[in-house]
Amino acid sequence: MSETTRKHVKGFMTKSRYDLTFDHLCVVMSFIKAYAAYLKRTGKLEVPKWVDLVKTGTFKELAPYDPDWYYIRAASVARHIYIRKNVGVGALNKVHGGTVNRGSRPSHHVDASGSVNRKVLQSLEKIGVLEQDKKGGRRITQDGQRDLDRIAMTLAEESDEE
């Protein structure tokens, strides 16, 4: 991939948290859905048996409705690490956390389930998308970088055609 194309793809994938627009959020969601579909289509991602029973955090009342939520979470985690380089389980717990409903008392932020995020990272490691870093956390491998670049490139080409 040429350097100008890589810059275009990187610009397509990343944006400052403060510069987010509705269009950019749609692009991010389309990338996550496309990569989740790729993970499901290849069939390499090992999905645990308990995914239909578990909640994704203590702040949730029910398990996810989407039967493919594990693929979507894996795609979201892969994109997160693609952008930020070294990420651990604790950081992912904060990102995927939410607010707990405490009735009439003020709401508070609660981290997501560490077990779910840890299993997602482990299954992405097994298929070669991520690897453990010496400094701590996980980082993306060359194969993972290639796959994510390829999907981002196809989405960028589709958006240029429209």
Image (cartoon, helix red, strand yellow):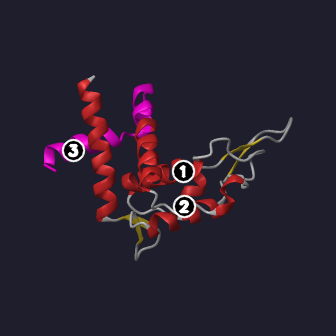
Residue topped by disc 1: 73
Circles 3 and 2, Cβ within 8 Å, touching? The answer is no
Residue 69: x and y in percent read: 59, 47
| 109 and 8: which is toward the camera | 8
* Residue at position x 29%, y 64% in the image: 142
Dominant secondary structure, magenta = helix
Residue 144: x and y in percent read: 34, 60
Q: Is residue 8 on the magenta stretch?
A: yes
Q: Is residue 125 above or below residue 110?
A: below
Q: Secondary structure at mark 1?
A: helix
- Amino acid on which the number 1 mark rests in the picture: Arg
Residue 94: x and y in percent read: 59, 53
Circles 2 and 1, Cβ within 8 Å, touching? The answer is yes
Mark 2 to mark 1 CA distance (whole Å): 7 Å
On screen, residue 44 versus residue 11, left or right, reads: right
Residue topped by disc 2: 120
* Mark nearer the N terminus (3 vs 1): 3
Q: Which residues are magenta?
A: 1-28
Indicate which disc residue 7 carries. 3
* Residue at position x 31%, y 43% in the image: 152
* Residue at position x 34%, y 42% in the image: 13
